[in-house]
Amino acid sequence: MIIENKILGGLLGAAVGDAMGSATETRSTKQIIAKFGGPVTDFIAPPDDVFARGFKAGSVTDDFSLAFCTAQAIVENKGIVDDDVAKQALIKWSYTDFYKLAGPTTVAAVDKMLGKEVPNFYNFLSYDCAKGSDGGAMKISPVGLLSGGDVDKAIKDAITICKPTHFNSTALAGASAVAAAVSEALNKNANVDSIIEAGLKGAKEGNEYAIKYGKELSNPSVYKRIKLAALIGEKYQGDINGAMQELEDIIGSGLSACETVPCAFGLLKACEGKTKEAIIAAVNIGNDTDTVATIVGAICGTLEGFYDEYYLNTINSVNGYDLKQLALDIKAVTNG
């Protein structure tokens, strides 16, 4: 498979997962089915009681819009990932309509970059474990796509991109796991198991780096939870409803990177890398559905070289994107 197809697949999978999951976020699987009359399997306008209220069907949210800005910033810097690119991507994104969906950790970081007064009501805390969120993991897939399949580079660059906002052991482990998994998925001989191994490597190294240079948080191990989630996914291959229930009950799919990231790896394994199946499962698993779907969509989409004309046209037209061109731009600066 030619590399630009894999890159486009990763971009499209992430965007579709985000846009489709925006309508179901915060509800449980049972509540999703009750609200929408069954599982959500297509783009629908988010209802008025979720974060993405007011956005159109097919619109992405903070997850993929920030990933898109990150990809653009790196491309504009000729593929070089450095501290300035990490900051410029955030500042550029802060001027988009999606910024109103930003989490408090990201808002505080951007305000600080812009020289604004940043109120911190918890400045007495030495360790704020809530900061171990999935805000780094949700935006990081372009780093993997820009790595040329070099997992070590993807981990290094993920750390650089996440430092301004999510420089702690939980968030950095999650983001590095996703970047490493997407990077491995670019490779010709990649498979679901090799991707999970790459994700584990990323989780381990991201965690260790943050403990040494950033901040260690008292949250469950992203590394160990990816292992457990993969075992659950393997157990329930062929029974996606069983996998979803077990992952929701044991791993969780909430805002912490120690939930969403392992959950995505569990769905990757349960769906055997099939992009559409994994996205729909993530969209309906409950809680932070758009982020789980963004992550698993990016990984599976890269592995498969996912392509769907309807999805691509909808994402491009609603959001003003040209994902094919972005894929070509990414390939050009990575010599992939």
Image: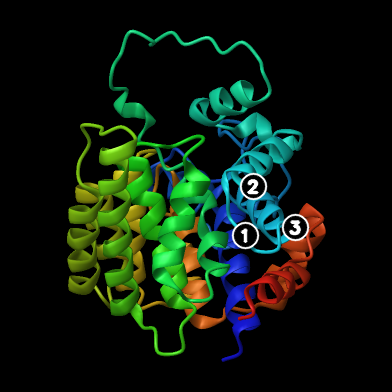
Nearer to the camera, 160 or 138? 160
Q: Quadrant of the C terminus?
A: bottom right
> Measured along the vertical axis of the image, is residue 78 above or below residue 19?
below
x, y percent for residue 51: 57, 33
* Residue 169 placement: quadrant: top left
- Measuring from the top left, give residue 191's x and y in whole percent: 36, 83
- Give the image quarter of residue 3: bottom right
Task: Verify CB contact (< 8 Å) between mark 2 and mark 1.
Answer: yes
* Residue at the disc numbered 2: 85
Q: Give the residue pinned by disc 1.
A: 80
Secondary structure at badge 1 equals loop
- Taking the image as drawn, is residue 290 in sight? no
Sequence-first tag of 2 and 1? 1
Mark 3 secondary-structure assignment:
helix
Which residue position is annotated with label 3?
Answer: 76
**Cα distance between the residues tagged 2 and 1:** 8 Å
Badge 3 crowding class, 10 Å Cα cut-off, few under 14, some 14 to 19, many 20 or more, is some
**The N terminus, quarter of image:** bottom right
In space, the residues marked 3 and 2 are separated at their CA atoms by 9 Å
Residue 101, relative to residue 3: is it above or below?
above
The answer to whether residue 336 of the structure is visible from this angle is yes
